Image (cartoon, helix red, strand yellow):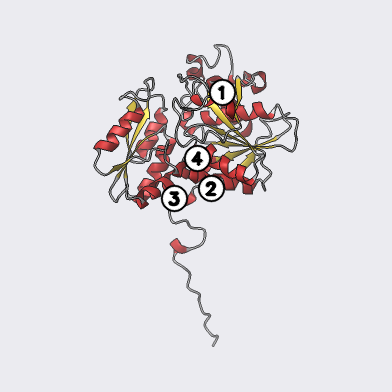
């Protein structure tokens, strides 16, 4: 009679290696991929950090849980509480994702220029969405900033993360995004390019990289009509980035260069790159990539390594950015022009400023 083999007890399925506790544990560790087709003929190497591969689909996943957990530790957010935030969409998704795991309700306030897809997506997570007019001053009581502030005051148990002033925003990128870029490039990164929204990504990741190597050049990409490149506040179509005020989360000392990017160049570069690289890019991605290409083309240095952070995908912009009629109706594409006719090489940076040249707040 053969002896019975002893069976090792296997850990419960939820405790096995490779199985994450919940969706928030899947945030980060996004890949770097080469953009050799778009950048053909450019001497520096250009690689993209694909933030759409976070579970909520954008770079904003990185800041959601840290902001919530900081509020819990400070006693600002308690069980059964409500998260109220003004958002262009992506921060709302990150917060809604974490809130579902944590058991919080969400109310998000958006400007009416944000895509219908973004509004529908937030509602799909169970959030309440309130839409406000875009073309009003930030101090106007109808602006999505002020409406959010009012709701946070009036809603019992409410907490407003305020990504524009919350220190957990840039800190999340200092702790995760910066180290990931440094490690993935073995410290060879020479340039980081980030489209500017709250300024949290560039401030946190840029600070980390400069601490590791002060020679790393940090480039901000800014929509025309936004204050970061010294422009007077004005209207622009690009979603999710640029500001008409100076957020506390933006460290004005971090950017070595700021490039001003038109709506046309941002959107057509995104379309150009999507067709050649197979990466469905959003408008903020096109902004960052156009700025990257313009700075990189001026360098005759094959050892330079540009990392451009692509904040989200083009899925939320299929009805706008990827709709030729929408582009034509807004004067971004000529009546007889095809998107395939666009060539980023035929355009030049409208403004490339050293950080010190930009008018600072106050």
Q: Are marks 2 and 4 in contact (CB under 8 Å)?
A: no
Q: Are marks 1 and 2 in contact (CB under 8 Å)?
A: no
Q: Are marks 3 and 1 in contact (CB under 8 Å)?
A: no
Mark 2 or mark 3: which comes first in sequence?
Answer: 3
Distance from the alpha carbon under mark 2 to that under mark 3: 17 Å
Mark 3 or mark 1: which comes first in sequence?
Answer: 3
Mark 2 or mark 4: which comes first in sequence?
Answer: 4
The residue pinned by badge 1 equals 261
Q: Quadrant of the N terminus?
A: bottom right
The residue pinned by badge 3 equals 23
Residue drawn at x 58%, y 48% is 179
In front: mark 1 or mark 4?
Answer: 1
Residue drawn at x 50%, y 74% is 8
Instruction: Give the structural element (helix, strand or loop) at label 3.
Output: helix
Q: Nearer the viewer, residue 248 or 90?
A: 248
Distance from the alpha carbon under mark 4 to that under mark 3: 15 Å
Instruction: Tell me: 111 left or right of 343.
Output: left
């Amino acid at each position: 009679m053969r002896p019975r083999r002893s069976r090792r007890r296997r850990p419960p399925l939820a405790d096995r290696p490779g199985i994450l506790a919940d969706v928030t544990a899947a945030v980060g560790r996004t890949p770097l991929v080469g953009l050799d087709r778009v950048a053909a003929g450019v001497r520096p190497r250009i690689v993209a950090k694909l933030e759409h591969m976070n579970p909520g689909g954008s770079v904003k996943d990185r800041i959601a849980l840290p902001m919530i957990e900081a509020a819990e530790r400070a006693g600002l957010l308690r069980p059964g509480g409500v998260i109220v935030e003004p958002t262009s969409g992506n921060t709302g998704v990150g917060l809604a994702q974490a809130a579902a795991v944590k058991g919080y309700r969400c109310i998000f306030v958006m400007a009416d220029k944000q895509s219908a897809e973004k509004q529908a997506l937030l509602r799909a997570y169970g959030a309440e969405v309130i839409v406000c007019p875009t073309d009003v001053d930030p101090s106007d009581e109808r602006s999505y900033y002020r409406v959010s502030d009012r709701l946070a005051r009036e809603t019992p148990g409410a907490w407003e993360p305020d990504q524009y002033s919350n220190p957990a925003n840039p800190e999340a990128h200092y702790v995760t995004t910066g180290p990931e870029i440094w490690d993935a490039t073995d410290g060879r990164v020479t340039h980081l390019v980030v489209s500017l929204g709250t300024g949290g990504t560039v401030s946190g990741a840029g600070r980390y990289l400069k601490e590791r190597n002060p020679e790393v050049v940090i480039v901000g990409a800014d929509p025309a009509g936004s204050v970061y490149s010294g422009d007077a506040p004005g209207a622009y179509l690009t979603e999710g980035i640029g500001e008409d005020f100076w957020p506390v989360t933006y460290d004005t000392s971090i950017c070595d260069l700021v490039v001003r990017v038109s709506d046309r160049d941002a959107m057509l570069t995104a379309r150009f790159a999507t067709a050649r690289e197979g990466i469905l890019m959003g408008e903020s991605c096109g902004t960052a990539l156009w700025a990257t290409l313009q700075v990189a083309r001026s360098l005759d240095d094959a050892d330079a390594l540009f990392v451009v952070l692509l904040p989200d995908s083009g899925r939320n912009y299929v009805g706008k950015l990827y709709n030729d009629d929408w582009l034509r109706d807004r004067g971004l594409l000529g009546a007889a022009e095809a998107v395939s006719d666009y060539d980023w090489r035929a355009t030049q940076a409208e403004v490339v400023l050293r950080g010190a040249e930009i008018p600072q707040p106050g």
